[in-house]
Image (tube, rainbow, N blue to C red):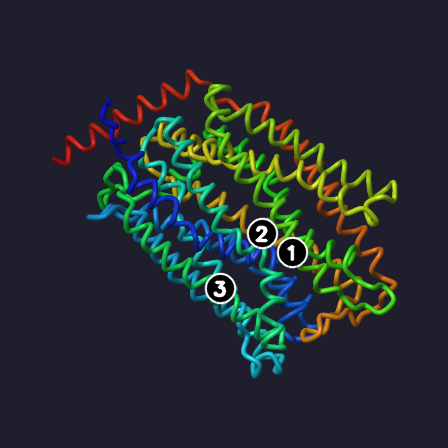
Amino acid sequence: MAAKIKKQYPEDFKTVFGLSTMNWFEVSSGAFLTGLFMLYLTDYAGIGALAATLGTVLLIVGRILDAVDDPLQGYIMDNAKPRKYGKYKYFIILSILITTISVSLLFSIPTAVASNTVLVIIWVSLFYILYDIGISFFAETPLKQSLTTDPVIRSKITTWPRIIGTFVAIPMAFFIPMLTGINTNIGNMHKSFSILTLAYIIPAGLISLLGIILVKEGKHLEIEKHEKITLKEIVHMFKINKPWILSTLVAVFNGFVWTLVFATTTYYIKWAYCTDLTTGVVDSAKFGSLTMVLGIFQLLPTILMAAISPWLVKIFKGPLKVYMLSMVLQIIGGAGLFISMLLGVLGTTPAIFFAFLAIILLGAGLSFVPGTLIGIECMDYGMYKTGREMHAIVHSVGRFIGKAQTALSPALIGGIMIATGYQVDSVTDTFTGDLSAIPNMLRAFIIVCGLLPAIFSLIALVILRFYPITNELRTEMNEAINKMKEEKAAQTE
C-alpha cells in the first residue's frame, strides 16, 4: 500500500486548521450584528421605545465613521513592515481581542444602565464603535493572498474556513430556541440573552486566537521606510484596477442579499406565523420550532454550496461563471417570495416561504467562494500593475461595503419598525404596539428580503458580464507576482 503523501504548505493540516478557526470570532460576531442586534435592542434589552431609533441612528452614523476609519486602518496595515511572524497576523490578533470584548458587552447591557437613557446611548454607542474598529483590523483576505497565487489552492483554503465557520454558526441558528429554554429557569429574557451571548462569543474568540497563531503567513514585498505607500499611489492603483472597480460594484448590490434576508426572516416568522394578532402574544414553542427550521435552511445551503464551489470553479475554469450562477438562484428565490406575497399565499403557508428562501440561500451560499477568489484576484491585479502591496487598502473598501450592508439592512428594518410603532415587552416577549400595523409590517419585510434581493442580484449579474480577468491574464499575473517576490527575497538575503 502506497504511503499517504503529506500535503505541503499552505494545504498542510496546521495551516488549514488555523485558517478554519481564526475566523470563528468574525462568524459569531457577524451573526450577532446582522441577525440579532436590532432584535436584541427592540425585544430583549429592556430599553423601551428608544430601541428602534437608537439602533437605526447608530447603524447609519457608524457607516459615516467607517468611510474614514476603514481606509485609514487599511493604510496602516499596508504600511506596516513585515516582522518575524508576518504582517497581517498581528492586526488579526488585535481584531480578535477588540471584537470579542466589544460584542460581549454590547449584548450584555446591565440593568442599571438599561434604566437610564443617557447611559444606554453611551454604552451601546461605545461598544458598537469598538466593534467596528476591531473588525476592520481582521485582514483575512490579504493574509490569504500572501499564501499562494494558485486559484485551485486558494479555493480550497477559502472553502474549508467557510464550511467549518458555518458549523460554528449552528448554535446561532438555534439561538432563539436556546434562549427560550434558558429563560424557563431564569424568567427574564434580558438576562437570558446576555448569558447566552457570553457563552458563545468568548469561546469563539479564544479559539480564533489559537487559529491565527497556527497560520504561517506568506512572503511579502519588503517595505522600507523610504518606500511608504503614498496617497498618489493608492489613487493610481484604484484608477487602473478595472477588475476591482467592477467587482466592487457587484459587491455593493450582491452583498445586500444575505444581510437583507438574515435581518428580516426571524422577525417575519415571529409575527406572521407565531403570534395571535388579536392579543400580540407570541407562541414561544412554535417560534422556537420555526426558528430552528430557519436555522437549518440557513446552514445547509451554505455548507452544501461551499463544499461544491471548488469543484465548480475547477469545472468552469475560474470563479466568474460560478459567481453568476449564484446570482441567478437569488433572483429566482427573491422573485418567488415577492410574487407569493402578492398572491396572498405566503402569510398562511410557511412551506412556500421556506422553499423560496432556500433557493435564495443556495445562491448566497454559492457566491462566497467565487466572490472571495475574485476579491483576491483584484489584489493580485493591483500588485501586478503597480509592483506594490496595497492589499489591506483594497480589502478595507470591501470591508466597509460589507459593514455598511450589515448595518443598513437592520437599519432598514428599524425604519419599518419606527413607522409601525414597534414595541415589545422584554420580559414576556408580547407585542405592545398597535396590532393592526403588523400586516403592513410583514408586507414590508417581504419586499426587503424578496423583491430587493432579486433586483440587486439582477443588477450585479449584468455588471459581472464585463469582468475583464481571463484565464490567460490570471496566469500572466501569477507568474509576474511570483517573480517579484523571488527578486525581493533575493535582494534581502
Circle 1: is it few (<14), some (14-19), or many (20+) Cα within 10 Å?
many
Q: Which mark is residue 103?
A: 3
Q: Position of residue 479 (x, y in %)?
A: 31, 21
Q: Position of residue 172 (x, y in %)?
A: 55, 56
User: Up-down: is 299 above or below 62?
Assistant: above
Q: Position of residue 236 (x, y in %)?
A: 42, 34
Q: On the picture, is 340 further left or further right than 489?
A: right
Q: On the picture, is 479 further left or further right than 435?
A: left
Residue located farthest toward the top when viewing the structure as drawn:
472
Q: CA distance from mark 3 to mark 1?
A: 16 Å
Which quadrant would residue 438 be assigned to in this image?
bottom right
User: Up-down: is 87 above or below 425?
Assistant: above
Q: Earlier in the sequence, mark 3 or mark 2?
A: 3
**Disc 3 + disc 2, Cβ < 8 Å:** no
Front label number (3 vs 2): 3
User: Identity of the amino acid at label 1?
Assistant: Pro
For mark 2, give the secondary structure: helix
Q: Which mark is residue 410?
A: 1
Q: Which mark is residue 406?
A: 2
Residue sitting at x 11%, y 35%? 493
**Disc 2 + disc 1, Cβ < 8 Å:** yes
Q: Position of residue 331 (x, y in %)?
A: 70, 33
